[in-house]
Image (cartoon, grey):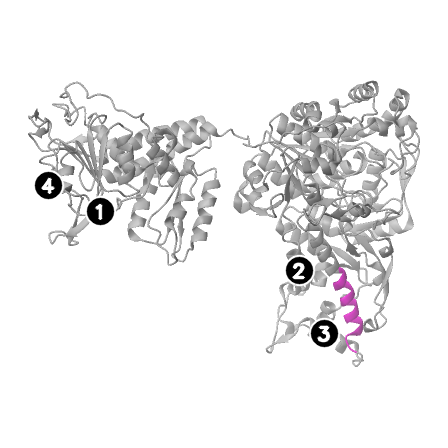
């Protein structure tokens, strides 16, 4: 039986069009069945055919060519060297044209066969010589099929690898389906030409749309070196392997030879061989084809490498081919030696196919541009409900979207068909990629109805992506489930500018908020449990010292006679200045300091949380069970997104950073005034475990198919109200230097934008390029003195009729917010979010005034009704603004005293005359400064309905002093938050909550009632 060519299992691509040039001058004219042989043209064939300088042929009556001298030698070493030199020059040119670009070849090997190692080393050396970046991936013999397929997938997706081969055979202890592994290679990287798709295209004659196995391709190159015309000749291929014989047949056929394939079962094999003007032998049988079988003057290509005993050789054996060489060279016109014939050509063809693949990649690859499919909207008038619009558009498979934007499969964890988590390894892979343009969407001081920041954010990215074909990402906050069932009903944008599916967006998503709830409540449980155990360790031990030794013995128990500190306990010892690691060596005083946290219950700031609006949990008493022995205290529940852990998630930069921030969270003070952290409680490691998946951003999409990261959703009052830094960083890398990342800041510019700059950008180090400031005619009328706007009630007449005077008067608020944005040195584009009740005169007035008072541009937007099309002018304005010069700067120096930082924000952003620290706030400022937290940034907790502390004061209030009633610390998140007035951290349910309308269709499993 025939065997594949043993020196390789590589592949290549046929470059020449089917058909060969006629024989050059000096050749004998040929006819079917007659091969023309050069006479006196050794110099012409010096590139590869060497041997006798003159060959004399004669045509006999049978039509055969009779060679009067030994065959010329087709020297594969010489030909391959020339090909490699040519490839080296091509690679050099590619690198000069595209700096930093390098053709990439990967070789995947399983096991440690000596012959495979030898062949791979030859390929690696050749690649290095040419300038190809070759990567050798070597898996152990214990590798399973799934492990091998995983690496194939990784190489398929790696943009730096333009071709790769699987070294055969697969040397594994486990059963592996070689066919399945080979066919898992994407055709555009199948430089081995061994996949069924490549074989099928070759069989159909699609030579320019596939790669050809390297050995047959190398054989063809050697045949071409003879100068003999292939078209019309009779070719015989002995062997039918997938690697050599079968593709050789197809290759010769589509170069217009008449081809006969023979094999070990062929009757009268010698007679068939004797018909061949061109003979290619690949059987794996030593000297199987005899010299007497060969047609005189034929071209003989011997692909075999076999070992036979030879006592004259030092190793006792010699290498022979599949053809009896010494006999054959006396009859053939041209013949390849073994070794030194086909083998070197195989490697050269692998390099050629890799370079060709790299060229194809460059032809298709547009630097910085995604190949992404967008969805078309079927716009309707009147605009249907949000849920109806969401369901009218079938989202793309989230896995497909991930591939479109350049994520690798190993970087994506699918949660069904419409949502996924993106691993932080993507950020590591892309760390050298330049960032895109960074845009923040904010708004003027809003009405209680909101002015459409989320809708504008989504409309803008749909316009930039689906209409202007820019790489663009939206990064938005995850909504709390509580308001979804309470008063909002959903928070995924609106109209034709939404994140879809909205059911997934609003309900659970991937469980991040549930993880935060679990982690937060674990801390709460740890606080009360530690207080309980310190107070009730034993009733029998009267002496103070013995009491804490008993506590110590339980904190550091003896296991099998050995007492050992845990890692987190070692860290606590270090913070206490105790350098010991052996529990038995601690002094009594050190035991007391280590074991006793001595939490002051009056200083506990950590509350339990729940992602449900429940007003009756705003104040509770805990510890009333008899088992708690009378140790009760008053506490409360907050809604989950108010947890400091949510703020930590939003501001963290890495898993390590999150672990550090979680450990720094201060939950109370000791009775000596020392801060007590989660690290002191011993719980920070467990918190990191609970949050290990929540740190990965959630990938979703807009109605028009642009990508969205939904990640983190901290409160915008007691926290900074922005989505996560990690999501922004990954998105900025994915879009590339010409792309855009659009994120949203909660509430108005005086709150969300100020915190975005002074807190989020301070920690992330990212610098925004554009501020999009959303304004509405409705809100401006309110600020101009219009009637009170109340959620749930119809708008007063003034808001639905034209009133230019109210608009112009209320413009003062928009003017102040433009000034606030420009204070940070960033250009401002005003997005005038149009409603159907607005008149063109009102909209034009707003745009004109905005541009007159410092806005880079101001444009009317109708994205709620028209999707990306309605934000096209806004997108174009953002593009222009992103190119404008900017000089981003922060508002204050962290080293300033706490009071001064608060004053700067109040005076510059709110327009206050001054601030007043009430006694509790002054006390906290002193305490936090003493504890070392005075250098943290400030996160003002103030009403969002006014620039002042009074929500009834609209427009631009003046002449007021901002009262600071308290200051609290989110040390882990990294800010102090002064309280201006009373902040509710647990919403309640209205008389008729949204859940009245929410239900599930049991037949379709469709969620109804979200709007």
Residue 284's disc is: 1
Quarter location, residue 135: top left
Mark 3 vs mark 4, foreground winner is 4
Residue 197: give x, y in percent of width and height. 39, 38
Q: Is residue 736 visible to us here?
A: yes
Residue 645's disc is: none
The magenta region covers: 524-538
Please rate how many residues cluster around mark 3, counting C-alpha atoms within 10 Å: few if below 14, some from 14 to 19, many from 20: few
Residue 289 left/right relative to 802: left
Residue 431: give x, y in percent of width and height. 56, 40
Mark 2 vs mark 3, foreground winner is 2
Given the current orientation, which residue lies at the most extreme front position? 1003
Compared with residue 309, is residue 823 higher up or lower down, i.e. above or below? above
Residue 588's disc is: 3
Q: Which residue is mark 2?
A: 686
Mark 1 vs mark 3, foreground winner is 1
Quote the CA–CA distance across marks 1 and 2. Answer: 62 Å
1007 or 420: nearer the viewer: 1007
| Residue at disc 4, secondary structure | helix
- If you read the primary sequence from the N terminus, does the residue marked by circle 2 or circle 3 appear first? 3
| Residue at disc 2, secondary structure | helix
Quote the CA–CA distance across marks 2 and 3. Answer: 29 Å
Quarter location, residue 841: top right
Q: Which residue is mark 4?
A: 326
Proximity of marks 1 and 2: CB atoms separated by less than 8 Å: no
Quote the CA–CA distance across marks 1 and 3. Answer: 82 Å
| Residue at disc 1, secondary structure | loop
């Amino acid at each position: 039986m025939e065997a594949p060519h043993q020196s390789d299992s590589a592949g290549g691509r046929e470059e020449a069009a089917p058909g060969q040039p006629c024989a050059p001058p000096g050749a004998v004219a040929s006819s079917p069945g007659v091969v023309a042989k050069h006479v006196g043209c050794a110099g012409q064939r010096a590139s590869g055919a060497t041997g006798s300088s003159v060959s004399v042929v004669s045509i006999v009556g049978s039509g055969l060519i009779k060679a009067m001298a030994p065959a010329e030698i087709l020297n594969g070493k010489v030909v391959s060297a020339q090909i490699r030199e040519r490839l080296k020059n091509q690679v050099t040119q590619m690198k000069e044209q595209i700096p930093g670009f390098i053709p990439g070849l990967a070789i995947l090997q399983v096991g440690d066969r000596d012959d495979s190692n030898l062949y791979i080393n030859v390929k690696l050396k050749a690649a290095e010589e040419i300038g190809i970046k070759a990567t050798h991936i070597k898996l152990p013999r214990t590798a399973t099929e799934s492990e091998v397929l995983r690496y194939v997938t990784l190489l398929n997706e790696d943009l730096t690898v333009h071709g790769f081969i699987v070294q055969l055979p697969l040397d594994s202890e486990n059963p592996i389906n070689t066919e399945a592994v080979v066919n898992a290679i994407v055709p555009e990287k199948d430089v081995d030409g061994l996949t069924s798709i490549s074989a099928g295209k070759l069989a159909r004659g699609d030579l320019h749309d596939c790669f050809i196995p390297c050995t047959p391709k190398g054989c063809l190159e050697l045949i071409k070196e003879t100068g003999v015309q292939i078209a019309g000749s009779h070719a015989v291929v002995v062997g039918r392997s997938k690697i050599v014989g079968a593709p050789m047949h197809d290759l010769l056929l589509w170069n217009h030879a008449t081809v006969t394939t023979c094999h070990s079962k062929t009757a009268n094999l010698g007679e068939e061989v004797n018909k061949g003007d061109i003979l290619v032998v690949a059987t794996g049988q030593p000297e199987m084809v005899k010299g007497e079988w060969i047609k005189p003057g034929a071209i003989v290509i011997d692909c075999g490498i076999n070992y036979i005993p030879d006592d004259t050789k030092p190793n006792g054996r010699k290498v022979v081919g599949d053809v009896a060489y010494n006999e054959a060279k006396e009859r053939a016109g041209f013949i390849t030696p073994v070794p030194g014939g086909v083998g070197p050509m195989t490697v050269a063809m692998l390099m050629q196919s890799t370079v060709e693949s790299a060229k194809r990649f460059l032809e298709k690859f547009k630097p910085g541009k995604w190949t992404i499919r967008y969805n078309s909207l079927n716009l309707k008038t009147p605009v249907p409900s949000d849920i109806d619009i969401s369901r009218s558009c079938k989202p793309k498979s989230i896995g497909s979207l991930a591939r479109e934007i350049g994520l690798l499969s190993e970087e994506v964890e699918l949660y069904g068909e419409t949502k996924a988590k993106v691993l932080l390894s993507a950020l590591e892979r892309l760390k050298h990629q330049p960032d895109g343009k960074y845009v923040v969407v904010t708004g003027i001081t809003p009405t209680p109805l909101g002015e459409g920041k989320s809708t504008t954010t989504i409309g803008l990215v749909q316009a930039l992506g689906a209409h202007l074909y820019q790489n663009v990402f939206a990064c938005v906050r995850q909504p709390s489930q509580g308001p979804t069932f309470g008063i909002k009903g959903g928070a995924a944008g609106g109209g034709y500018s939404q994140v879809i599916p909205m059911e997934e967006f609003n309900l659970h998503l991937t469980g991040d908020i549930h993880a935060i709830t679990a982690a937060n409540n674990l801390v709460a449980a740890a606080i009360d449990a530690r207080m309980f155990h310190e107070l009730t360790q034993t009733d029998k031990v009267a002496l103070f010292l013995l009491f804490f030794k008993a506590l110590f013995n339980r904190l550091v128990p003896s296991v099998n006679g050995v007492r050992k500190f845990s890692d987190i306990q070692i860290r606590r010892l270090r913070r206490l200045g105790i350098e010991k690691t052996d529990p038995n060596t601690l002094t009594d005083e050190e035991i007391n300091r280590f074991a006793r946290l001595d939490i002051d219950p009056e200083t506990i700031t950590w509350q339990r949380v729940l992602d449900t609006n429940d007003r009756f949990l705003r104040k509770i008493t805990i510890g009333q069970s008899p088992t708690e022995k009378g140790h009760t205290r008053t506490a409360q529940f907050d809604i989950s997104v108010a947890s400091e852990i949510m703020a930590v998630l939003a501001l963290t930069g890495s898993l390590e950073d999150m672990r550090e921030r979680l450990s720094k969270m201060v939950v109370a003070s000791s009775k000596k005034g020392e801060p007590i952290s989660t690290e002191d409680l011993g719980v920070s490691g467990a918190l990191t475990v609970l949050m290990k998946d929540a740190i990965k951003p959630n990938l979703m999409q807009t109605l028009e198919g642009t990508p969205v990261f939904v990640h983190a959703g901290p409160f915008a009052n007691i926290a900074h109200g922005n989505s996560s830094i990690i999501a922004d960083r990954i998105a900025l890398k994915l879009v590339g230097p010409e792309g855009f990342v659009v994120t949203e800041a909660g509430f108005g510019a005086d709150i969300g934008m100020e915190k975005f700059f002074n807190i989020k950008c301070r920690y992330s180090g990212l610098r925004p390029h554009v501020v999009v400031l959303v304004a509405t005619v409705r809100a401006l009328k309110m600020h101009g003195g219009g009637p009170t706007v109340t959620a749930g009630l119809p708008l007063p007449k003034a808001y639905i009729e034209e009133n230019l005077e109210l608009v112009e008067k209320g413009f003062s608020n928009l003017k102040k917010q433009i000034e606030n944005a420009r204070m940070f040195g960033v250009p401002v584009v005003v997005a005038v979010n149009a409603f159907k009740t607005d008149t063109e005169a009102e909209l034009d007035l707003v745009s004109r005034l905005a541009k007159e008072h410092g806005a880079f541009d101001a444009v009317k937007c109708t994205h709620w009704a028209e999707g990306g099309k309605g934000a096209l002018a806004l997108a174009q304005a953002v593009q222009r603004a992103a190119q404008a010069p900017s000089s981003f700067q922060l508002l204050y120096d962290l080293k300033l005293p706490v009071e001064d930082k608060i004053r700067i924000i109040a005076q510059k952003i709110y327009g206050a005359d001054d601030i007043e620290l009430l006694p509790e706030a002054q006390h906290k400022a002193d305490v936090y400064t003493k504890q070392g937290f005075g250098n943290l940034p400030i996160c003002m907790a103030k009403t969002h309905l006014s620039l002042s502390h009074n929500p009834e004061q609209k427009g631009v209030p003046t002449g007021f002093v901002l009262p600071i009633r308290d200051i609290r610390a989110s040390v882990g998140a990294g800010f102090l938050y002064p309280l201006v007035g009373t902040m509710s951290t647990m919403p309640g349910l209205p008389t008729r909550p949204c859940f009245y309308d929410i239900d599930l269709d049991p037949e379709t499993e469709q969620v109804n009632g979200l709007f």
